[in-house]
Amino acid sequence: MDSEQTISNEAIIPLTTSGSLSQAANGVEDEVIISAIKVNKYFGDKHVLRDVDFEVRKKEVVALIGPSGSGKSTLLRCFNGLEKHTSGEIYIHGHLLDPRFSVKQLSPIRSELGMVFQNFNLFPHMTVIQNVIEAPLLVRKMPKDQAMALGEKLLAKVGLSEKRDVYPSRLSGGQKQRVAIARALAMQPRALLFDEPTSALDPELVGEVLKVMRDLAYEGSTMVVVTHEMQFARNVSDRVVFISDGTIVEQGDPQELFKQPKHERTKLFLERVLSTMA
């Protein structure tokens, strides 16, 4: 493949019925936003993702849970090309994400996905509003007045209007993460990817971030969340996916999976993590 080959609109993955879990009742639509087929990932000799089949539909909230080092974050990062999968196929809204794509080729695919990282990744030399509108200005080529209006609307949404002209160094961890969520939303993505968004926060700050995420879920945002927050996974997501040793061991309705896991590995994991919450 030529390194500057354009992304073909014909690289469409057909709709499948895999992972369909009472979507009509939850407002989940048939339109597939993310699809992974037999995805493998190696770091040297370490096989970190093993023949992963995964699908996310419009308005679906999917929680990825599992032990540390199981491949959850690696899978998430493969969806926007931050990690290059070794084999298999990934489609973002029907567009093939080829691991050989250049940064330029990845750009239109990445613009379809908003990414929220563990450690915020805000630009320290920019104010809050500047952080939020930077990508719409540079990537979407949005007029500045339109970007400012959008940025102010999103800061209000995450409860940070009064911080618009503050620099990140003056914010708490929870506030920084809420700015990061607003920044991801500013690109008006088809889906939001959250990589353990509360893991770097002090316990008393976790709730404010989870509230914003819950609100987004209830508003119909498409979300894939790598999380250790079991209450969020159980009560907010439409589907929970348990990953261990790079393999999807089990997935299903959150209430059913938490109450009656089918696999022993899932059961042992949930017993261990839930016992620490008791």
Image (cartoon, rainbow, N blue to C red):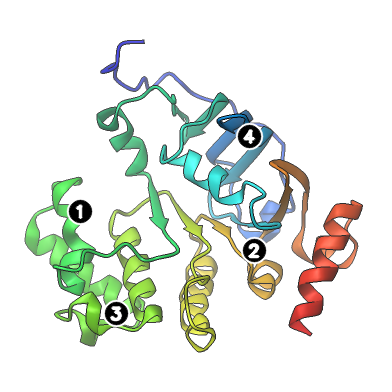
Which amino acid is tagged 4? Lys
Q: Residue at x 65, y 57 (%)?
A: 68
Label 1 secondary element: helix
Which amino acid is tagged 3? Ala
The number of numbered badges drawn on the structure is 4
How far from the left and from the top, in percent, is residue 244?
A: 74, 48
User: Sequence-wise, which precedes: disc 1 or disc 4?
Assistant: 4
User: Sequence-wise, which precedes: disc 2 or disc 3?
Assistant: 3
For label 3, the residue is 156
- Neighbour tally class for label 2: few under 14, some 14-19, many 20 plus, Cα within 10 Å: many
- Neighbour tally class for label 3: few under 14, some 14-19, many 20 plus, Cα within 10 Å: some
Q: Residue at x 35, y 41 (%)?
A: 110
Label 2 secondary element: loop
Quarter of the rendering occupied by the C terminus: bottom right
User: Sequence-wise, which precedes: disc 3 or disc 4?
Assistant: 4
Whether residues under marks 2 and 1 lie with C-beta atoms below 8 angstroms apart, the answer is no
For label 2, the residue is 237
Label 4 secondary element: strand
For label 1, the residue is 136
Which amino acid is tagged 1? Pro
| Residue 51 location, quadrant | top right
Which amino acid is tagged 2? Ser
How far from the left and from the top, in percent, is residue 254?
A: 75, 63
Whether residues under marks 2 and 3 lie with C-beta atoms below 8 angstroms apart, the answer is no
For label 4, the residue is 46
Closer to us: 10 or 1: 1
Marks 2/4: CA distance? 31 Å
Marks 3/4: CA distance? 44 Å
Marks 3/1: CA distance? 17 Å
Q: Nearer the viewer, mark 1 or mark 4?
A: 4
User: Sequence-wise, which precedes: disc 3 or disc 1?
Assistant: 1
How far from the left and from the top, in percent, is residue 188?
A: 32, 54
